[in-house]
Amino acid sequence: MAGVFSNALEMIKELSTPHALQFLEPIWIGVYKQLQMLQYSLLLIQPLIEDAEERQLTDKAVSFMVAQEARCVNSFSLDHNPLLFKLQLGKKLSNVNERINELIEEMGKFKLRVLENNNKPLKNRPQTYSYVDESPVIFGRDEDKEKLVHMLIRDSFDEKVAVVSIVGMGGLGKTTLAQLVYADERVKNHFKQCIWVCVSNDFDVLKLARGIIHTATGENYDHTNMEVLQKDLRDVLGQERYLLVLDDVWNEDFEKWDALRNMLLDGGEGSRILVTTRNEKCSRLMGAQRHHFLRGLSEESSWVLFEHKAFAVGAPKPLPKLVEIGQQILDKCQGLPLAIEELGSFMHYKSKESEWQAVLENIETWKLQSTQNEIIQELWLSYVDLPTQLKKCFAFCAIFPKDHDIKEEQLIQFWMAQGFIPSQEGTDMEVEGREIFTELIRRSLLQNDCSLQPLEKGRVCKMHGHIHDLAQLVMENECFFPLLKSTAAPKIPIKARHWNLYADENCEKGDCSIIHTVLYCRRDLSVLPKLKLVRVLDLSHTNINELPASIEHLHHLRYLDISYTLIGKLPESICMLVNLQTLKLHDCYKLSEALKALPAGLNQLQNLKTLTQYTVGDDAENNIGQLKSLNPFGELALYNLQKVKNADEARKANLGKQFPVWMGERQQFQYLHRIELSECIECEQLPPLETLPSLAYLSISGMDGIKHIINNSRGNNALQSFPALKELSLYRMMNLEGWCVEEGREANLCLFPCLTEMHITECPKLTTMPSIPTLQELYINQSFCETQISLVSEVRRFFKHLESSQSLSMKSCTDNYKSLKFLDDLTISSCKNFTGVSSQGDSVPPFLKSLEVFECDSMRELPTCPTSLQSLSINRCRGIESLGPEMGHLTSLSKLEVSRCPKLVSLSNGMQALTSLQYLSIEFCQALKSFPEGLQQLLPTLKELELKIKKCPELERLCNPGGDYYDLLSTISDKQIGEEPELESKPEQIIQVPNEISIGAKQALKCIVTDWFLLSAILICAIACFIKFLFNQLDNQNEKEFWYIPPT
């Protein structure tokens, strides 16, 4: 259903173009009348369809009616023959109009209504409340809860009343997490008032204000006068510190939020508003200073929750086979708590292996067919809330298989080809497409957390499995792709309009005249002439060596990919595809070799935006001037540029609009994804890189003349700088002092709103950092010298505004990292002021999981570490004498490494509590002569421990046979004490070594001669070298001279 009406309206627009008018002039009067009627009907019913789409999940009659409407509009197709086309057009339009009029009458029976923006009723949406029963265990959310409690009661903010948000897709447990935080005793004791209000879709300021007063006082409140209401609300809140939870927010209207916010500002210092929402845009609109992005449960927590629901409490341990099947079922949930609970409860009453196996084999069908499925009902709300334009773009993602890497550039090209992004004068479809892609990420319908390949153009996302189920439900049977390769030929559903044949093409094609998309069509090309309405055609990776001439009849084709094929020449008929927007020719090596591989009339394709290969020729038909009519905003690759004869010829190509100088307008480089600037020594000012809307990767190195990254004195009034940048690398910028030329205006800019990773190396004068709430990984090497930092006020220090960073690596740096409260990984190396002594200010973040310290000679002991620490590594810290007075609280520590610390004389007390320890390595610590008592108690209990003791003479003696610790280690099978053990030698293999050889040489020689294989190899090599030497000498000697080799 998605996109049907937009496609039809786009078709009407195409039939109204000057070219079409000229062609249809003989019959235009009748056609024009029918087109006007059709356009009116479509515009009339399109608003009603939104209501129908919401109701079709539970109302089968409405669902059937919507499908009929879609089938009616999609049935419009015409013959390729120009005469038949003209004859058919009027009759076809008349038939469609008649059928739509019938459907309009039927729609009246269902009492459909127009839904206004931001007022879409979310049917049966239950009111939430603050109470949570903590007697059953809430699995896997302890760390999330602690972080949020920390944000609410300990973090400092710039505003008296600050907003904190929980963001995530439906079913993740945002409300449950908020309930846990709300019920926490620390929260209750910190705030004078705690108020819970369920917002849902109806962000009515009057109702919400009344709801806050009612919840706070416990009394009914019916005033509707806003003046009275706002005074009463301020009186209720008073000047006390309060916590207000706004649960399930969908609002995108800033004016509504601002009106409510102004009534909430009289609270006491430290008041907090906790918001839960599926939409990151809502969170940012409300000015949240902390965004907690909720993720799925871990595998371990998922299984514990599933086991709790699926198996009776106190029942015998489930059979291993049921556990195996259960884990496979659990994989389908992808960490979504709602799905785990529903499936776990569903399996609770099934005890037979056959029943569990049946559920596993039919789980996809069960998820899609069960409209009472709570998972689908919950996620359906996210779809209903989408604007019309986004609905069709989202639903089309069902064309991809589950867990597929969805590439932004390709998906936008698909949307454009399907007509989902309407073309409007003055706007670029690519820009609109990127905004739609970003919006789907913000609404948690796409997951932007997979690694971005360095050479990829644009972002790469995935779609959660249950969100994919939702997209499939919306598309019904419009998308088809075989699940597995098989010899049996799967039958394509009659309604399928989008084929993805990535797994198997051995299927019954059926009616091809209604197909709009064909992906991975790799064998049977006889189907091409039948694809009358195809808009997207992917023939990449096929063995074809030519395109059939009949391709000219694919008038609707907008996307054609023939990459990685054996095609040596494109047919002239391809120039008839006047709607073509994207032509991909990657790695068509035969096409590259041909001098006239591209047809002469390519300049007729005025809608072409992406052309991945153009080979410049000598003659007028293939010279670079042929590109003058093209409008390549996506990608253009040119070959054989040596064929360009002069500047005038190049000027005719008119490519300056797409490839301007750096100081050009932002619009000209809006799709640039990656920039690397290096060794521009004389450069003193960077171009306005901060304005590029698609720039995701930036590397600047060896540019000593640069003092600031952004010249905000240029008059750029953009609210965001580097709006899409994800990774920034600054290397050897010896004079870089700050981020903006006018530092006073830094606070008014939103710098790096999407930055997740930053590398800073050899930037000694850089001392400050703007607030970057999205930053997760930070690597600092030989930057921020002490004399420079001492000149900067505390509030502008480098780490002051990086509270959300999760990974930090520091080398030869001096600034204090204590403000980075949410770090998971911390690496400190060559930092001369780091002592580790807590009394001197050295401590680590409260949720740290991994700590590595290298070459910090001033370090005297281990800093106080949190209970969350899982991995600890101390290496080449020559001043450390002890790991600290107490380590017993590190119950999560699984890995401990200590190496090359010559002054280390003791580990720590309380090590008997390190029950999670799985790896212990101590190397080159000669002064360490014993284990603490706690570790001696612990070692016999750690059967799975991997133990390594090396170059610690006294410890090795105690751990080897006869030593005091030998029996303690008897239960540990994976251990190495000292060097790798030598092979035992038989007495007759030992060769006596003369006394005059040194002891060290004796040991080396003994090692050699006790291994006969090694000894033989050495002798063979020695003989070969000697023979070569002999022949070299013979060449240089007189013929009469000779060498004598005595017998052995």
Image: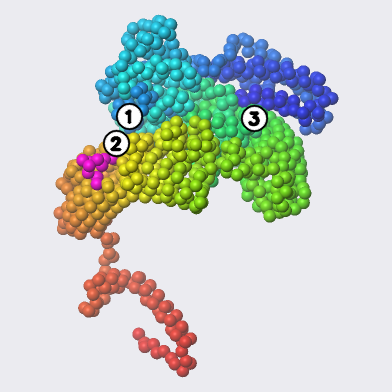
In the rendered image, residue 191, in percent from the top left (x then y), is placed at 29, 20
In the rendered image, residue 510, in percent from the top left (x then y), is placed at 68, 32
For the point 55% across and 37% down, which residue is it? 408
Q: Mark 3 sits on what residue?
A: 426
Q: Mark 1 sits on what residue?
A: 156
Question: Is residue 836 found inside the magenta-colored segment of the image?
Answer: yes
Name the main secondary structure of what is drawn in magenta.
Answer: loop
Q: Mark 2 sits on what residue?
A: 846
User: Which-is-in-front pick, marks 1 and 2?
Assistant: 1
For the point 49% across and 15% down, which residue is it? 123
Work out which quarter of the rendered image holds the C terminus and state it.
bottom left
Helix, strand or loop for disc 3? loop
Work out which quarter of the rendered image holds the N terminus and state it.
top right
- Tell me whether the residue at label 1 lies in contact with that at label 2, contact meaning CB atoms closer than 8 angstroms: no
Q: CA distance from mark 3 to mark 2?
A: 51 Å
In the rendered image, residue 45, in percent from the top left (x then y), is placed at 64, 16
Span colored in magenta: 835-848
